[in-house]
Image (spheres, rainbow, N blue to C red):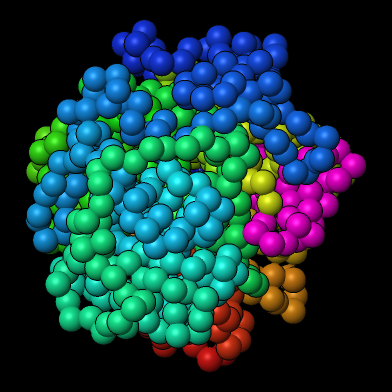
C-alpha cells in the first residue's frame, strides 16, 4: 500500500480548516442557544444560581459561592438537598415512574429494562441494607463491580444516606483496590462474584478477598450474584446482596445533606505516583453535571435514548452515566461488555435495536472501530443517532471525520468534550446547536466557565499560539480537594499559577487564529525535539491519517543530539500486507511531509497492541520506558499487562 490518502493532507491539526455548522433543524430545537454565553458572562454566579434551580433543594442556598478559603470552594452555601432524591424519587413523584431509566444489556445477551419506579425501590432497599450494616453519613463505601444496574443502585444508595462512595474499576488489581480502600478508610465493600468480558465470566470476588486481607478495617463485603461463579466465603464478613436486600423495605425516608456534603472520592487513573483521591461534593457537582448534560448533549428526556459507553468506574461514568443523566430524567443504555463481543457489530446492533439517539465514547474506541472497517457499522441502521460525543484524549481529526461520516451519517453534530476527574463535569466543548465544529478541537469554554491558554508566566497567549490550559474561575463541580492531602491539592493544581489564582489542568493547548482551543494532551506528553515543542497528538494524527495505520502512539526518547527523539508505535489496519521495512520508511516520510522534517520519527515500531488504561488512555510513559530500554514502571492500571511483553519483543536492542 503506497498511495497516499486521497483527501487533502488536512489531518495535521495545526492546519485544520474544515468547520461544520450545526444543521438548521438542530439549532432550532436546541436546548441551549448562543445567548447562553453572553448571559453567563454578564453575571457568572447568577448564571450558576439559575442552573442550580434544575435541582430540588429542601433548603435554599443563601450564597452562590464562598471562595474566601480558596482554593477550597464552597458552592451554594447553606443549601440542603438529597442527591438520590434528585436523581430518582422526584421523577417518580412527577409521574414518570414508568419511564425506563436504563436499558441494561449484559454481554451474554440478557436484558433488563429498569424504570425510575423500580430504580427507586431498589435504591431504597440498598439504602436500608447499608444502614443495617451500620453505614452512616460520612462513612466511605468501596464499590468494585462490573457494568450492571446494581452498580448504579449501590452508588445511589450511598448518596441517599450520605455515605461517600469510591468506585474502583473492575479491571484494577487486588493491590490497587487495597490501596484505595486503605486511603479512604472504607469499612464496607460492594462487589460481585464476577462480570462478563470478552465472552467469558471474569471473576471479581477473589481480588476483593485478596485486597481485604490487607485491610482489616473492612467489616462487610456485600456480593452481587452476577455470573454464578464459585466464590470463597468468609462467614460473618461476606453477605449476598440479594439476601440482605431481600429482607429490606422498598421504602426509605431520605435525609437532606449540606450542599458541600461529600458525594464521592474518585481515584485518578494515575500516570505516576500514588493515585489521588479526588473529592466531589453534592450541590455544585449535581448542578454542573445536570447543566452540561442538558446543554452539551441537548438531552430531551421524553424522546432521547442516550448512551454514554464509558465504564462507571471512571469519572465519565459517574457524571454522564449516573448523576447527570438521572438528574435530567434520561433514558440511558447500560451495556456490560466489550464493544466487539460477541461480534464486531455489537454496538451498532444495539443502537439500531434501541434507537439510540446520542452516543458518547472515547477516541481510542473510535479508532478501534476504524480498524475493523466501515463495512461493520454499514450493516446496521444508525439513523436514530442525532448527536455524537467524544472524551478522554485529544481526538485525531481523522478519527473525528470518520466518526462524523460513518457513524453520524454526516448529519450529527460531533462534540469533543474536554474535562477531567478533577473538574467533575465538561468544561470546554462545542454547544451542538451553536458551534461550527472543527475536527479535533474542543472549541470554547462552556457558558459560566473560564478557561484560558497561557504562557509560563500565566499570560494569555495570542491567537495562533500554544501554551498551558488553565481554568481562571472556580466552577460548581470543581474538586474540593484530594482525600486526606490538602498540601498535595494546593501543590498539584494551584501552585503553578498561584499569583493569578488559576487552576493548572496539566494539559498543553493551542489557540487557533479564531481563538478556538485545541487540547494537545498532558504536558508530560509534549516533546522537545531540537528545541521545538511537539505534541504527541500532532504526530499521532499525522500517522493515523495514513491509509495503512489504524492507531498510533508516540513517545519521546532521550537522544544525545536532539534532546528527545520521536519513537512511534503503530498498529496497522487489517489487510495491510506491505513489508515492514518499506512501510516504516514510508511512514517516517509521511510524518515529515505532513508536519515537517523536525517531526520525522527516529523509529517506527509496528506493534499488535498499545498499552492502555481502562479509561482508554494510552500510557505513553510505558512506551517511553521501552523506547529508552528502561525497566517498566508501574503497570497496574493497564487493561492488559501482557501487552507490554508483546511490544518489548518488537523493540530492537540498539536504537
Ligand atoms: C474525562 C476524563 C483527564 C485528561 C485531561 C486530558 C485528557 C480528556 C479530552 C482530553 C483532549 C479531550 N482529555 N478529554 N484531551 N481532548 N476532549 O477523561 O477524565 O480520566 O481525569 O482524564 O484526559 O489530558 O487532562 P480523566
Left or right, residue 107 beside residue 40: left
**In front of the other: 529 or 292:** 292
Q: Residue at point 16% right, 32% down?
A: 355
Highlighted range, magenta? 482-511
**In front of the other: 408 or 489:** 489
Left or right, residue 355 beside residue 398: left
Residue 288 seen in render: no
Q: Residue at point 62% right, 11% down?
A: 39
User: Measured from the top left, where is residue 558 in percent x and y?
Assistant: 69, 76
User: Is residue 280 located in the magenta-colored stretch of the structure?
Assistant: no
Residue 562 sits in quarter: bottom right
Residue 174 seen in render: yes
Image quarter where the C terminus lies is bottom right
User: Is residue 497 located in the magenta-colored stretch of the structure?
Assistant: yes
Q: Residue at point 63% right, 11% down?
A: 38
The vertical placement of 126 against 511, above or below, is below
Left or right, residue 372 beside residue 498: left
**In front of the other: 354 or 459:** 354
Residue ranking furthest to the right: 499
User: Measured from the top left, where is residue 547 in percent x and y?
Assistant: 33, 54
Residue ranking furthest to the bottom: 653
Image quarter where the N terminus lies is bottom left
User: Measured from the top left, where is residue 321 in percent x and y?
Assistant: 36, 43
Residue 461 sits in quarter: top right
The vertical placement of 592 against 395, above or below, is below
Left or right, residue 586 beside residue 463: left
User: Measured from the top left, where is residue 569 in percent x and y?
Assistant: 46, 70
**In front of the other: 104 or 651:** 104
Amino acid at each position: 500500500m503506497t498511495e497516499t490518502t486521497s483527501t487533502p493532507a488536512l489531518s495535521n491539526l495545526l492546519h485544520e480548516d474544515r468547520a461544520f455548522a450545526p444543521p438548521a433543524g438542530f439549532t432550532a430545537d436546541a436546548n441551549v442557544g448562543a445567548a447562553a454565553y453572553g448571559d453567563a458572562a454578564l453575571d457568572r454566579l447568577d448564571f450558576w444560581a439559575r442552573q442550580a434551580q434544575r435541582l430540588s433543594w429542601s433548603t435554599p442556598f443563601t450564597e452562590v459561592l464562598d471562595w474566601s478559603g480558596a482554593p477550597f470552594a464552597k458552592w451554594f452555601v447553606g443549601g440542603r438537598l438529597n442527591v438520590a432524591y434528585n436523581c430518582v424519587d422526584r421523577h417518580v413523584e412527577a409521574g414518570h415512574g414508568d419511564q425506563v431509566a436504563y436499558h441494561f444489556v449484559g454481554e451474554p445477551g440478557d436484558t433488563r429494562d429498569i424504570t425510575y419506579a423500580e430504580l427507586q425501590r431498589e435504591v431504597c432497599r440498598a439504602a436500608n441494607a447499608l444502614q443495617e450494616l451500620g453505614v452512616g453519613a460520612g462513612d466511605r463505601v468501596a464499590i468494585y463491580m462490573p457494568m450492571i444496574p446494581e452498580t448504579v443502585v449501590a452508588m445511589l444508595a450511598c448518596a441517599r444516606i450520605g455515605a461517600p462512595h469510591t468506585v474502583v474499576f473492575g479491571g484494577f488489581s487486588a493491590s490497587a483496590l487495597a490501596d484505595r480502600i486503605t486511603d479512604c478508610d472504607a469499612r464496607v465493600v460492594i462487589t460481585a462474584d464476577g462480570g462478563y468480558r470478552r465472552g467469558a465470566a471474569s471473576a471479581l470476588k477473589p481480588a476483593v478477598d485478596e485486597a481485604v486481607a490487607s485491610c482489616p478495617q473492612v467489616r462487610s463485603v456485600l456480593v452481587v450474584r452476577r455470573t454464578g461463579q464459585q466464590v470463597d466465603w468468609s462467614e460473618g464478613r461476606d453477605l449476598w446482596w440479594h439476601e440482605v436486600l431481600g429482607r429490606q423495605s422498598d421504602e426509605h425516608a431520605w435525609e437532606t445533606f449540606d450542599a458541600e456534603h461529600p458525594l464521592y472520592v474518585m481515584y485518578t487513573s494515575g500516570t505516576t505516583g500514588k493515585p489521588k483521591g479526588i473529592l466531589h461534593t453534592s450541590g455544585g457537582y449535581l448542578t454542573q453535571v445536570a447543566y452540561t448534560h442538558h446543554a452539551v448533549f441537548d438531552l430531551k428526556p421524553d424522546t432521547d435514548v442516550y448512551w454514554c459507553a464509558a465504564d462507571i468506574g471512571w469519572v465519565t461514568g459517574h457524571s454522564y452515566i449516573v448523576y447527570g443523566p438521572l438528574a435530567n430524567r434520561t433514558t440511558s443504555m447500560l451495556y456490560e461488555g466489550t464493544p466487539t463481543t460477541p461480534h464486531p457489530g455489537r454496538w451498532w446492533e444495539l443502537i439500531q435495536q434501541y434507537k439510540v439517539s446520542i452516543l458518547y465514547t472515547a477516541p481510542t474506541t473510535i479508532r478501534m472501530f476504524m480498524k475493523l472497517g466501515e463495512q461493520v457499522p454499514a450493516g446496521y441502521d444508525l439513523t436514530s443517532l442525532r448527536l455524537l460525543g467524544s472524551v478522554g484524549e485529544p481526538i485525531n481529526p481523522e478519527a473525528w471525520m470518520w466518526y462524523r461520516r460513518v457513524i453520524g451519517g454526516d448529519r450529527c453534530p460531533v462534540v469533543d468534550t474536554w474535562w477531567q476527574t478533577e473538574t467533575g463535569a465538561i468544561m470546554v466543548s462545542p454547544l451542538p446547536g451553536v458551534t461550527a465544529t472543527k475536527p479535533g478541537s474542543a472549541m470554547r469554554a462552556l457558558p459560566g466557565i473560564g478557561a484560558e491558554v497561557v504562557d509560563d508566566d500565566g499570560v494569555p497567549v495570542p491567537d495562533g499560539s500554544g501554551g498551558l490550559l488553565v481554568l481562571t474561575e472556580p466552577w460548581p463541580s470543581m474538586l474540593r480537594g484530594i482525600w486526606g492531602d490538602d498540601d498535595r491539592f494546593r501543590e498539584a493544581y494551584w501552585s503553578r499559577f498561584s499569583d493569578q489564582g488559576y487552576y493548572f489542568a496539566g494539559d498543553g493547548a493551542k489557540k487557533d487564529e479564531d481563538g478556538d482551543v485545541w487540547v494537545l494532551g498532558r504536558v508530560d506528553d509534549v516533546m522537545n525535539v531540537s528545541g521545538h515543542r511537539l505534541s504527541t497528538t500532532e504526530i499521532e494524527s499525522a500517522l493515523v491519517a495514513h491509509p495503512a495505520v489504524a492507531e498510533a502512539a508516540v513517545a519521546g526518547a532521550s537522544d544525545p543530539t536532539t534532546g528527545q527523539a520521536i519513537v512511534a508505535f503503530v498498529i496497522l489496519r487489517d489487510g495491510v500486507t506491505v513489508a515492514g521495512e518499506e512501510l516504516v520508511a514510508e511512514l517516517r516520510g509521511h510524518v515529515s511531509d505532513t508536519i515537517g522534517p523536525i517531526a520525522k520519527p527516529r523509529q517506527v515500531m509496528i506493534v499488535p497492541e498499545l498499552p492502555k488504561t481502562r479509561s482508554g488512555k494510552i500510557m505513553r510513559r510505558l512506551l517511553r520506558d521501552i523506547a529508552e530500554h528502561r525497566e517498566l514502571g508501574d503497570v497496574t492500571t493497564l487493561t492488559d499487562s501482557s501487552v507490554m511483553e508483546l511490544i518489548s519483543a518488537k523493540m530492537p536492542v540498539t536504537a
